[in-house]
Amino acid sequence: MDNSINIAAEEKNQPLQHDEHRDDEASKMGMWLFLFTELLLFGGLFLVYTIYRFMNAEAFEHAGMELNTNLGTVNTIVLITSSYTAALSIVAVRHKQYIKAKYLLWVTIFFAMFFMVVKYFEWSAKISHGLFPGMEEFLNLPPGEGLFFFLYFFMTGLHALHIIIGSVFIGFVIYYIDKGTIKHDDYVVLENAGLYWHIVDVIWIFLFPLFYLIA
Amino acid sequence: MTSSTIDLNDRGYLSSEKKSGIGAWIFSTDHKRIGLLYLYSIAIFFSVAVFLGFLMKLELIAPGETIMKAETYNRTFTMHGVLMIFLFIIPGIPAVFGNIMLPLMIGAKDVAFPRLNLLSWYFYIGGAIIAISALFFGEGLADTGWTFYAPYSVKTGTNVSTAVFAAFILGFSSILTGLNFLTTIHRMRAPGMDWFKMPLFVWSLYATSWIQILATPIVGITLLMIIAERVLGIGLFDPALGGDPILYQHLFWIYSHPAVYIMILPAMGVISETIPVFSRRKIFGYKAVVYSSLAIAFVGYLVWGHHMFTTGMSGPALIVFSILTFLVAIPSAVKVFNWIATMYKGSIDMQAPMLFSLGFIFLFMIGGFTGLVAGALASNVHIHDTSFVVGHFHYVMFGGTGFGFFAAMHYWLPKVYGRMYNTKRAKTSFWIIIIGFNMLYFSMLILGIMGMPRRYYDYLPEFHNLNIVSTVGSWIMITGLILMIYNLVVGANSGAKAGKNPWKALTLEWTTQSPPIEENFDEIPRVEHGPYDFHLINQENDG
């Protein structure tokens, strides 16, 4: 190897390191691909739910009566509204209305917390009836009903976990808007947070009828 | 002073001028360093798994208890399978050569998400540590086989949960790598490189990444259900409580059959690189090779049921799964046809990578044809759960993916380390490996047809002779493997300088120095010809 060529190459290479790499399309694409995996994660559970509902139709119907449709409906409305506020915040950032954007995101987080509080009351009612997997009443349920409650806790629990992750994600976004790293011409992080929040919403829109309404 | 500067420059991304110590490796986001992290960790797990395989074959050298008890044998084949499948062969080629070569081959500085790439490696190592930790507490290693079939996996006292959780974590690693590669291929190709000017290895990674993303989450959730069942006793796979053990098998194979194509497609991609280069001919039917990769990825999704022909699925389902299984053979055969047609009238140079590639074709064809025997309904019942099946998938997975991996090692080692191994020793090791390989696994094919079941530490006296052949074959093969690895390690450390392009290949990774500099290229290359346009280049040289 020729020494001079290499040194020349190295010098030439220097400015490249200060290059700012930014490819919003790539970030969004990565997010979309990640959302596919989220859908398939829940897809596996939806498949299990469908098959076991088919195999244990009566037990599922009976167990489903235990759920509180009113609370489910309230949560559905809350979550859809939160998706709306998340979407509005993107518009606000695009128009440089940063304070409005932050306000809208705080509202989104508030709705998320509200959802979790309702969820808490729902779950604790079931748990006080001993219906959490592994508890005494759970083990004495007729065949099939245990599967229903397991799937209920597993799927809504996994969904609630996503709500928490999404809220933290949005919290970071608020911080970045504050810091000025998310701007009217650089807001892909916010968009990705929004996408994530919408998928959490969409999954709930499938969970809600499957558990609360079909019975 | 000057001489040391030259030396450091020569070492490219391996240079330790500013970046030395372990931190410079485990916190590096350079795709090449991450690729090497994978290579070294994979090499360790591969060696351990080979050793476990060696112990299993030693146990089978004579009927009855030879060196271990039945229980130990069960744990040994489980660990052999878990290590080989989840830690070697699924991540193998994509994580090592995909990471190192993909950005180089498309003329990019790095992958799209370098930090995510490093995170994938952490997941990989985390999963590996969890898998191995099962050795040290409770009832020890799982004894279920790598498939974790319910209900046994729910009932056994061994540490199934740890093995399953490890596989779950490794799934994340796989998903994130796939996501990263897809975005990289979509967004970071050099100017002039349109989709059909991409090297075929890149295409195979593209198809593989889609399977990784779309299939892995299902197995993740399934494995979590096994853990939940073990901890909480829900009856998910217990008919008495409304569950269905067969559903577990469906869910497991919905992922794990496509995973077979995660394993084999990148190896096919490697072969599609080496065959044109060492035949000095343009690949025959570039688009056919591309579309067959995508077809394999797609049809491979729909054939999982062929693992379950004896579970009492309905007749129509059996027939559909069997037909779909036969369909996968078509794109695979298209590839083999194209590789052979590429060599026809080429000027073939029998270098080590080419030898391993030809070994791949030979072994993969035996694996493929025995696959048809296993995929046909009538013959499947006869050979189900016999050592025929074990022989078949070792021909496909080891003879296919393993040899693809070795071909890639020999092909890209001069680029990765800037040094050349001893080519004569490389060829010798190839011949030793392939002779041992065929003794080891062809005997298993015959034994399976004679009726020897898999996963037993004992067998009837009538199977003795062939088992001896098989065990001796394993010794020969391992000797060859040791020679090969020794040769590669010595070559990487102190071989002769390889130069930019020792094989006179046309893909972009050969246009930068060996080993490549930190951000790969002095300036982003512009692509003017296809990856295999040897005829254009040869004319230029003639003129």
Image (cartoon, rainbow, N blue to C red):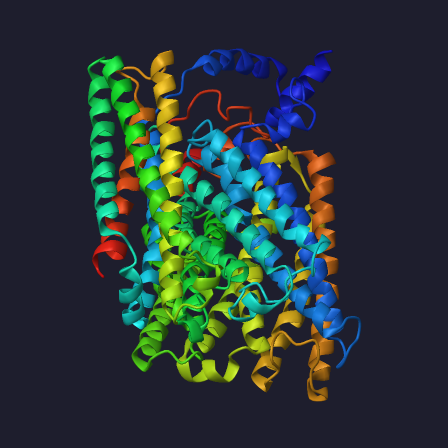
- Horizontal and vertical percent position of residue A203: 28, 46
Looking at the image, residue B435 lies above or below residue B416: below
**B332 or B80, which lies in front?**
B80
- Image quarter of the C terminus of chain B: top left
Name the quadrant containing residue A38: top left
Name the quadrant containing residue B255: bottom left
Say how many tags the image has.
Answer: 0
Q: Residue shown at 59%/66% (left/top)?
A: B145
Q: Is residue B436 visible?
A: yes
Looking at the image, residue B80 lies above or below residue A205: below
Left or right, B48 with reference to A195: right
Left or right, B413 with reference to B250: right
Q: Residue shown at 26%/19% (left/top)?
A: A103
Looking at the image, residue B62 lies above or below residue A146: below
- Horizontal and vertical percent position of residue B507: 45, 37
Left or right, B413 with reference to B494: left
Left or right, B235 with reference to B465: left
- Horizontal and vertical percent position of residue B74: 66, 69
Residue furthest bottom as drawn: B462
- Horizontal and vertical percent position of residue B541: 45, 34
Looking at the image, residue B111 lies above or below residue B406: above
Q: Is residue B297 visible?
A: no
Q: Residue shown at 72%/50% (left/top)?
A: B425
